[in-house]
């Protein structure tokens, strides 16, 4: 099994990513979940992560992470995920509590306490603040990190014409992560915009008998109705793509590139500058820019996973 740690800001698509991970426990050993301010405040996303992990029967630690970017002002995703972060969906109350302490200390402990010879795959699907802190404060963890499979970035943007929301939110953190030399799989907008579910598929999830399927169907309906999806045939469930990449890498295509991050305050703030030139230097190509997906396979796999919960 793959050892994974999920870092997220739930967030509707983060919620689906957690659900997809929970449905993949035969292949994924989920060690824990950390939260980061992104789609909503750190309090809200942490409450959502706790409620989701209880709802999904995911008996893993949840720890609160950074309440804002390394150097910038925090700005959330506003109405895209609703005021709570999960649309209008109200999950059952849980008595589950976040672990004490900070996220990067706990992630470090879980990485360093893995059995000898085993490594951790990090799966960040929000701004990269916690991961940058982990790598800076505990550089010894790098050797025990298998790879970082993240949702963020791409060769175009959504928060701005050139920047994707997670990277735009904390460009300095993203730069630390991309500069780390660790193997990184970037499931950015190039691939997430080719993936997703259509209206009929979301409806059928919403109309299903199961409580779990209904709740996720309801969240996706809310997400689909946000301004981001005007004129879109698919609702892009960005963060779930990173999880499906872990279980089904065979349905994706990508290329090895180097990535730099625009950390200015200019129009390209938060842009992931991907060097796709054939003549680019070999050194520094530590990033797999995932740029294609078998859509039907993705839809079948995701629906089967959600249906199995
Ligand atoms: C990313 O931004 C957030 O709103 C989503 O949860 C996803 O992680 C997509 O750009
Ligand atoms: Ca997210």
Image (tube, rainbow, N blue to C red):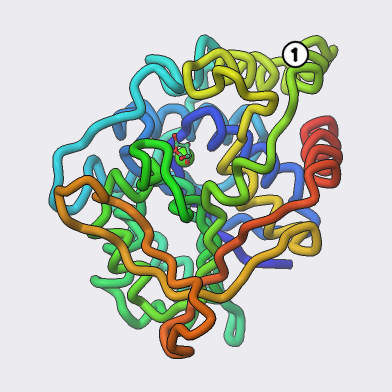
How far from the left and from the top, in percent, is residue 10? 47, 33
Q: Residue at x 51, y 70 (%)?
A: 184
| Quadrant, the N terminus | bottom right
Ligand 1 has an atom within 8 Å of the beta carbon of the residue at disc 1? no
- Residue 16: image quadrant is top right
| Quadrant, the C terminus | top right
Number of numbered callouts drawn: 1
Q: Residue at x 40, y 39 (%)?
A: 98
Q: Is residue 267 left or right of residue 114?
A: left
Q: Secondary structure at mark 1?
A: helix
How far from the left and from the top, in percent, is residue 132? 30, 63
Q: Which residue is mark 1?
A: 206
The answer to whether one can see residue 43 in this image is yes
Q: Is residue 233 left or right of residue 49?
A: right
The answer to whether one can see residue 35 in this image is no
Q: Is residue 123 left or right of residue 264?
A: right
Q: Residue at x 38, y 15 (%)?
A: 83
Q: Residue at x 36, y 47 (%)?
A: 162
Q: Measured along the vertical axis of the image, is residue 292 above or below residue 94?
A: below
How far from the left and from the top, in percent, is residue 14? 53, 37
Closer to us: 18 or 285? 285
Closer to us: 276 or 164? 276
Closer to us: 9 or 237? 237
How far from the left and from the top, in percent, is residue 185? 55, 65
Label 1: how many Cα within 10 Å (few below 14, some 14–19, many 20+): many
């Amino acid at each position: 099994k793959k050892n994974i740690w999920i870092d997220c800001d739930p967030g509707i698509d983060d919620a689906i990513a957690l659900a997809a991970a929970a449905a993949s426990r035969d292949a994924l050993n989920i060690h824990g979940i950390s939260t980061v301010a992104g789609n909503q405040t750190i309090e809200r996303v942490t409450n959502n992560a706790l409620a989701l992990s209880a709802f999904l029967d995911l008996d893993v630690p949840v720890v609160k992470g950074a309440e804002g970017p390394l150097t910038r002002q925090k700005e959330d995703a506003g109405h895209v995920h609703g005021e709570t972060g999960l649309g209008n969906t109200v999950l059952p109350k849980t008595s589950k509590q976040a672990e004490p302490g900070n996220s990067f200390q706990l992630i470090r402990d879980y990485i360093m306490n893995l059995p000898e010879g085993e490594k951790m795959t990090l799966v960040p699907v929000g701004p990269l603040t916690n991961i940058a802190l982990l790598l800076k404060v505990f550089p010894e963890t790098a050797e025990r990190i298998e790879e970082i499979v993240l949702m963020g970035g791409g060769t175009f943007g959504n928060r701005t014409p050139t920047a994707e929301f997670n990277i735009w939110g904390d460009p300095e953190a993203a730069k630390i992560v991309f500069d780390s030399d660790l193997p990184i799989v970037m499931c950015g907008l190039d691939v997430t915009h080719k993936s997703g579910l259509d209206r009929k598929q979301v409806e059928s999830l919403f109309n299903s008998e199961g409580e779990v399927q209904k709740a996720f169907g309801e969240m996706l309906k809310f997400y689909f109705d946000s301004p981001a999806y005007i004129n879109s045939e698919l609702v892009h469930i960005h963060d779930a793509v990173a999880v499906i990449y872990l279980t089904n890498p065979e349905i994706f295509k990508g290329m090895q590139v180097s990535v730099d991050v625009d950390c200015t305050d200019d129009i390209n703030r938060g842009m992931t500058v991907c060097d796709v030139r054939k003549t680019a230097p070999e050194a520094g190509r530590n990033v797999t820019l995932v740029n294609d997906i078998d859509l039907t396979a993705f839809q079948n796999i995701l629906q089967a996973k959600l249906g199995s919960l």
